[in-house]
Image: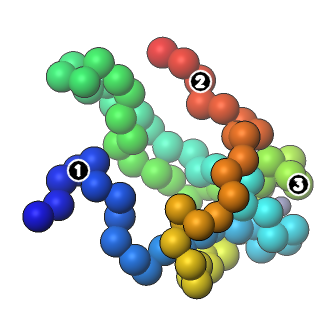
Amino acid sequence: MTSPTDPPAPPYYVFVCNVCGSDQVTREAWAAWDVATQAWVLNTAFDFAYCHRCLGYAQLDQLLLTSSPAALPTRTAAFPPASG
Ligand SMILES: [Zn+2]
């Protein structure tokens, strides 16, 4: 049995910028306030994507990972999420 806190099952994907190949990409989205958890929760992700390496609009490629994301090195976020 799975719960919402379980890690996702494979296959695993990564989205990268189709110009520079960086995975430091984000998409425009709406967040909705969840009263029960007292946190902003992703509601809708739009098509507009931004590459934080190219510093501009990006088209994203979806790549299949050949190993678990847990096996990949961790890194510090280049664009930490805003608080509150
Ligand atoms: Zn890029």
Q: Viewed as shown, does residue 73 lie left or right of 64?
A: right
**Amino acid identity at mark 2:** Ala
Q: Viewed as shown, does residue 76 lie left or right of 32?
A: right
Q: Mark 3 vs mark 2: which is more N-terminal?
A: 3
Q: Quadrant of residue 28?
A: top right
Check the image and report above or below for 76 versus 33: below
**Amino acid identity at mark 1:** Pro
View extreme (front): residue: 71
Q: Quadrant of the N terminus?
A: bottom left
Packing grade of label 3 (10 A; few <14, some 14-19, many >=20) is: some
Packing grade of label 2 (10 A; few <14, some 14-19, many >=20) is: few
Residue shown at 70%/67% (left/top)?
16
Q: Position of residue 57 (x, y in %)?
A: 77, 55
Instruction: Tell me the residue that label 3 is attached to.
Output: 54
Q: Is residue 6 visible to us here?
A: yes
Q: Position of residue 34 (x, y in %)?
A: 26, 26
Q: Position of residue 18 (x, y in %)?
A: 77, 73
Q: Mark 1 vs mark 2: which is more N-terminal?
A: 1
Foreground disc of the pair 1, 2: 1
Packing grade of label 1 (10 A; few <14, some 14-19, many >=20) is: few
View extreme (left): residue: 1
Instruction: Tell me the residue that label 1 is attached to.
Output: 4
Q: Which mark is residue 82?
A: 2
SS at mark 3? loop
